[in-house]
Image: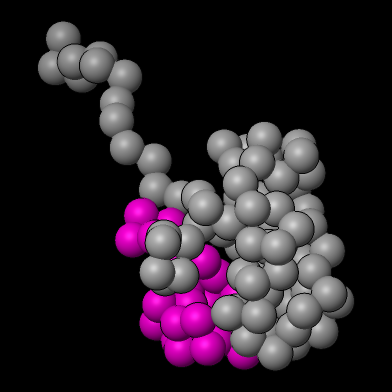
Amino acid sequence: MPVLLVPGVLRAEAGGASRLEITASGSLAAVLAEVDERWPRLARRIRDEQGAVRRYVNVYVDGEDSRRTAGLETPVAEGSEIQVLPSVAGGSGFDVRR
């Protein structure tokens, strides 16, 4: 069964879990559909209203960026590891020139 790795910043939306066992496989779309059904708050942070992966979220299937493979049609096999990485913006405000 595929496993979705949840980064710390999104764990509250997944009930605090760092790893989610997914019963769906076949494609990334099928995995994300299950996430939407079981963890809707998490799903809203990953996909937009049209169902596309949000532009500031990177999704990797077995270490491969899904945007560089087949997008939502990226194959997901039994035992695949899916990693969700939202971009982090901002800074400390610390001036390194001092």
Residue closest to the eye, 33 or 95:
33
Q: Is residue 61 visible?
A: yes
**Residue found at x 65% / y 41%:** 13
Q: Is residue 42 above or below residue 90?
A: below
The reply, left or right, for residue 88 in relation to residue 20 is left
What segment carries the magenta color?
A: 53-75
- Where does the C terminus fall, quadrant-wise? top left
Residue 88's spot in the image, x, y percent?
39, 41
Residue 63, image quadrant: bottom right
Q: Magenta segment: does it hold 41? A: no
Q: Is residue 93 above or below residue 49?
A: above
**Residue found at x 53% / y 77%:** 64
Of all residues, the one furthest to the left in this rendering is 97
Residue 7's spot in the image, x, y percent?
62, 46
Q: Is residue 5 above or below residue 65?
A: above
- Where does the N terminus fall, quadrant-wise? bottom right
Residue closest to the eye, 36 or 15:
36
**Residue found at x 81% / y 84%:** 78
Q: Magenta segment: does it hold 58? A: yes
The reply, left or right, for residue 85 in relation to residue 48 is right
Colour scheme: one colour
Of all residues, the one furthest to the top in this rendering is 98
Q: Is residue 62 visible?
A: no
Residue 37's spot in the image, x, y percent?
71, 63
**Residue found at x 76% / y 39%:** 15
Residue 66's spot in the image, x, y percent?
48, 77
Residue 94, image quadrant: top left
